[in-house]
Amino acid sequence: MNVTKVLDAKGLACPMPVVRARKTMKEMETGEILEIFTTDKGSVADLTAWAKSSGHEMVDQKEDTGVFTFWIKKG
Amino acid sequence: MNEVTAKEIETKLSAGQPLTLIDVREVDEVAEVKIPGSINIPLGLLEFRMNELDKTKEYTMICRSGGRSGQATNFLENYGYKVVNMAGGMLAWEGPTEDLFTKNNTPGGKSEDSAVTPMTAGEVAKKVINKEKFFILDVRNEDAFADWKIEGENIQYLNSPYFDLLDGVEEILDQIPTDKEVVVVCAKEGSSIFVAEMLAEAGRDVHYLQGGMKAWSEHLEPVKVGDLKDGGAIYQFVRIGKGCLSYMIVSNGEAVIVDATRMTDVFLDFAKQLNVKITNVLDTHLHADHISGGKKIAEAVNGTYWLPPKDATGVTFDYEPLEGGRVITVGTSKIDIQALYSPGHTIGSTSFIVDDAYLLSGDILFIDSIGRPDLAGLAEDWVGDLRETLYRRYRELAEDLLVLPAHFMIIEELNEDGSVSERLGTLFANNHGLNIEDEQEFRQLVTGNLPPQPNAYQEIRQTNMGKINPNEETQREMEIGPNRCAIR
């Protein structure tokens, strides 16, 4: 995947992963992909819901030993 | 997290102690009012600027109400810095202040802003039981809110996810009443503090739920259900956020616990307060909606843990087999707990009759619903057992027994005092699940129309069997959501 920016939000609790994702996304262009790492379980549903509500596309996500990775395309 | 009061800081500063104060509010907030000499690093920038700090020095963190600075304190602690949080923030500060525009120092005087105050799960539970009118602003995502929320007969709700409020709360301000108490709720509390502080800045007095829905899920409210003939008593522990009910039967200095939740300290402390020794701990069945604390309590008090053997085929630890017809005595006087084999919800499900007066029905019979037979994957096999238990075995019991189930589903099932109970005869008359004459129709109801299964129910069963040992945080996550053990 062609990742434009990477955001490491590991160790951050709600609401910070979404706050940081939103801030980073503001600096990006439509169609670019943001890769985000988190460890907060609540971030899975919240980043998905936030992406939807802000018009971005959750392209893919995975979990590996407690670290969640998301790829979100800016809408 | 280490905390100090605003007063302690004021005293130390006036005594000339060299404290380093870091204010994590936004620049414009600090410009309006600050403690003279404090350094401003907005919370969002802390991670980029923490390398400016010295790990050998101690820092005092400050914000408006103590919420953001608490987050900052936890964050810096994780990175090995020495930090303390000033509890209550600038709202609690009565010492000298200055503002950036005039540099005018004021000799004191508390900020006139509106306030954010925490509300505990216990305080919210009291409001629900007393049927108080209040307002909940739930800032979790819409799916989480639809799945599970704080229920109450006189609660008014607004669900507005925090991530839609990052630019401010103006859009929802006119939907938030000013004539009712407002409690902001989220999963753990972080986002609710964030939103509550914005509401306070907009001039509203609001509370946030301390510990969020996790604390709500874990809160237990003990209620005395009734007396025993010899002077003992039976207590119900209402887990109001999740609908689980546990019991403590007390007589002559001894106690028996039935269907304990994993918040074992609550039971141990309660027994200590009553000055009774826990001798036996029982589970009516292998639970699928919540993690049992039974085994842990039995170990802590060196008591006996009982489990129905037919539910315990996969269990990895020792237990005493709880079988129909067994009598367990509490105290020196004779208070029998008769075990009654009553399969249906699980194959081993066992009910208890205590003191010939109380029927602890487990997950077989509830106040306004009956147990579901499918959580171990065997609905078709167990529906016959469920019918047999509800329509024959229970019919043979005395109608004036007070039914004490292991769950409630809806808040309307709570009595005036917050307890959950009803006479067996009344349930035979009013509970729909006990009044389906046609067996085929009954089968259809309990196998064809099942609600979604509880969150992580298979992992919960495995935990209760001792097959897996998740840490406390994982156990909390597994139990998120309502119990969903019933069919209406």
Image: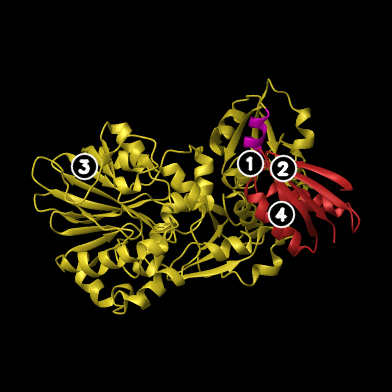
Chain colours: A red, B yellow
Instruction: Identify which residue, B144 or B69, lies in the foreground.
Output: B144
User: For mark 1, what is the residue?
Assistant: B71
Q: Residue furthest front?
A: B381
The residue where tag 4 is placed is A47
Residue ranking furthest to the top? B56
Q: Chain for mark 1?
A: B
Q: Residues within 10 Å of mark 1 (few under 14, many from 20)?
A: some
First of labels 2, 3 by sequence position:
2
Q: Is residue B375 visible?
A: yes
Q: Residues within 10 Å of mark 4 (few under 14, many from 20)?
A: many
Tag 2, which secondary structure?
helix
Give neighbour class at mark 3: few <14, some 14-19, many 20+ (Cα, 10 Å): many
Residue segment shown in magenta = B72-79
Badge 2 and badge 1 both on one subunit: yes
Mark 3 secondary-structure assignment: strand
As shown in the figure, which amino acid type bears the numbered disc 3? Answer: Ala
Residue type indicated by callout 2: Leu
Query: Is residue B127 depicted above or below B96 in this figure?
Result: below
- What numbered label is drawn on residue A51? none
In the rendered image, residue B103 lying in the magenta stretch gets the answer no
Which residue lies under the disc numbered 3? B255
Q: CA distance from mark 4 to mark 3?
A: 47 Å
Amino acid type, callout 4: Leu
Location of residue B308 in the rendering, given as x and y in whole percent from the top left corner: 29, 47
Q: Nearer the viewer, mark 4 or mark 2?
A: 4
Q: Is residue B462 left or right of residue B187?
A: left
Distance from label 1 to label 4 (Cα)?
A: 20 Å
**Disc 1, SS:** helix
Q: Are marks 4 and 2 in contact (CB under 8 Å)?
A: no
**Relative to B15, is B452 above or below?**
below
Q: Chain of mark 2?
A: B
